[in-house]
Amino acid sequence: MKRILSSLLVFLLIITLVPNFGVAQGTLAITSAKTINASSGESIKLPITIENLGYYEIQDIYVSAEITDPTYVYLTGPSTEYIEYIEDGDYEKVNFKVEIDDLTPKGTYKVDVTIRYDEIVQNETMYIRVSSNPPKLNVSRIDVLPERTINPGQKFNIGIELENLGDIVAHDIKVTLEGLDNGITLANGSSTQRIQSIPAGLKNYAAYQLQASKSLQPGNYQLKLKLVFNDDMEDTLDIPITVQKNNENASDLVFENLVFPSGTAGESQEVIISFDLKNVGKIEAKDIVIKAESLDMTGLVPKSLSQLKIDSIAPDEFENVEFKFLTTKNGETKNYPIEINIEYEDEMSPDEQKYNLSQHVGVFIEYPDKDANQSTPKLIIDKYSLEPDLVRAGDNFTLNLSFYNTNSSKTVRNIKIFLTSDEKTDSDSNSAGGSVFSPVDSSNTFYIDSISPKGRVEKKITMFSVPDAQAKTYTLTANFEYEDSEANPYTATELIGVPVIQQSKLDTGEIGFSPEAYVGQSTPISLEFYNTGKVTLYNMMVKIEGDFQTENGQYYVGNFESGSSEYFEGYVIPNAPGELKGELVFSYEDSTGQEQEIKKEFTLNVMDMPMEPEFPEGMPPMPEESSGGILKSKVLWGSIAALVAIVAGVIIYKKKKKKKLEAMEIDE
């Protein structure tokens, strides 16, 4: 009996050590990095490590991958991989081939991963972060030899330095110079050159031999540089060329000994403008036409002919030229400009084209003080200010105004001033084409009884800017209605600039991390973040900070546009056990150029790496019990019930056998 009971107890112990296949569930999980870094133009493999975290072998596993937006990033191989089996505690790896287009914008692309086995479907998410930009060629320098500018008829060389501003090598570059039909032609060679490659951040050079036509008019000319590279990428850049007059061989007229009143002229006074027109060129200047015109006839009018003609001026010769003007009556005290224009040609000038030369002089005319009889007093805003200086959309602001009467003898009265704005909000915004500004607890109209000569009155008004106003400078118009001392009505307007900014807004999701971590082992920290404001966030950076080592602990987002979302995943490597605190730090510049910083904290419980348990040879490790402990184990209670039944059966059998022997002894 004791031997049987001992055997049953050993059997019970063995049963409790063996996992119950009817209860324990196998679990597969992706244990590799959830974010893969890549560059545009690359062909990569998306590695996925699948680990069996359960207690029994799992067979017939199908792993599928699907890219949410396959426009630029897409699968080039099978989208499903088959794994025959994964033993408990073991893992297998699968790879999916992914192509990233040359023009792929910088960003994070989502990959949906599905794992199917034993009628179980598990969904996981991975990300491909494209952090590089496609090749971008730019003209960094233009060399024109032998001079920066060229003369008609001159041969010259032009060198064009190309720089690759992208992150990917530009290869098989075909450089074609276009626009060579406007008086600039090839002197030698071909208009198309080839450059094998320009790596990211480096430069290369293309050179052409050109010639300007003899009849080419001086001025600025635009050539075009057409670039074809990386099989199907194209770009066109402007190449400016400046053509100047051939000073070495052509005529060249200049002003010398220019004489005009340097003092003050009075009313009804003759004014004489004279100068020598000299040819300092190499050949004769011909068909010379000289014009002198007053640009303000209210104070200065011509007294002599305003146009003269000279047949020719030989090299090193000059002609004296004189014009007479007369000041008017009842003008305004100020400076009156006179413009002198000269047109001429020579044997080298282009057909039907003339050379131009101009000069401006000013005559200051002072009139008797008529301010006492002035009939038009002026009312202006001589200064204004905003509180705060930059108005945030959706906030109140104070507009301080100073109204100034410029007249030195007349008072302005019955002054009505009202503010208007022609600018409206977008038709598809919440305010749907309404006014950007509105007064708060007041009207947008001021009334001032009077302003004395050279006097000023200051007013302030509180206004509100609508929340969906675009970030820019808006214009308010101040409309004046006033009278002078004789009740003559006047109107005027003044413009006021109001800079409006939109407040930046960055929202984040919940930080994803495991609350328990192990010393020396990397632990992923991840989250999604969103630009929910109305302006772009510039030079955005995400970093993990704390007393620990990191992997991929920094991500440069760049310009984060309104309505965009991004995903970040980095890894923390703890150095010691205990509670470990860290921060995800978001830094960026808002629309005003001010630096902003947002921090999100997280806490990890760091433990030492667990030791592997030792078991006697041939003895399997003790499986982890399900929730509730050993007292709730169906295996334990089932085994105890079976043991009790067996023991009861043995006892009954023994009693029956004993009674039977006793009965036989009685019979004997």
Image: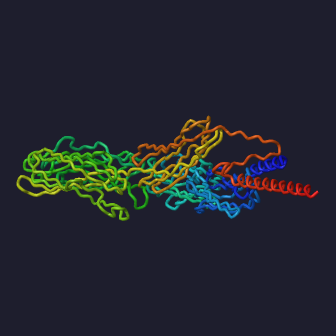
Q: Is residue 393 left or right of residue 24?
A: left
Residue at position x 85%, y 56% in the image: 659
Q: Position of residue 382 (x, y in %)?
A: 21, 46
Q: Position of residue 564 (x, y in %)?
A: 49, 56
Q: Position of residue 289 (x, y in %)?
A: 31, 56
Quadrant of residue 534 within the rendered picture = bottom left
Q: Position of residue 11 (x, y in %)?
A: 80, 50
Quadrant of residue 355 within the rendered picture = bottom left
Q: Is residue 87 left or right of residue 33?
A: right
Residue sticking out furthest to the right: 668
- How many marks the image carries: the answer is 0
Which quadrant is the C terminus positioned in? bottom right
223, 397: nearer the viewer: 397
**What colour scheme was applied to this rendering of the protein?**
rainbow
Residue at position x 50%, y 59% in the image: 183
133, 438: nearer the viewer: 438
Do we see residue 482 in this rendering?
A: yes
Do we see residue 162 in this rendering?
A: no
Q: Is residue 118 left or right of residue 178?
A: right
The relative height of residue 114 versus residue 625 in the rendered view (above or below) is below
227, 460: nearer the viewer: 460
The relative height of residue 145 versus residue 289 in the rendered view (above or below) is above
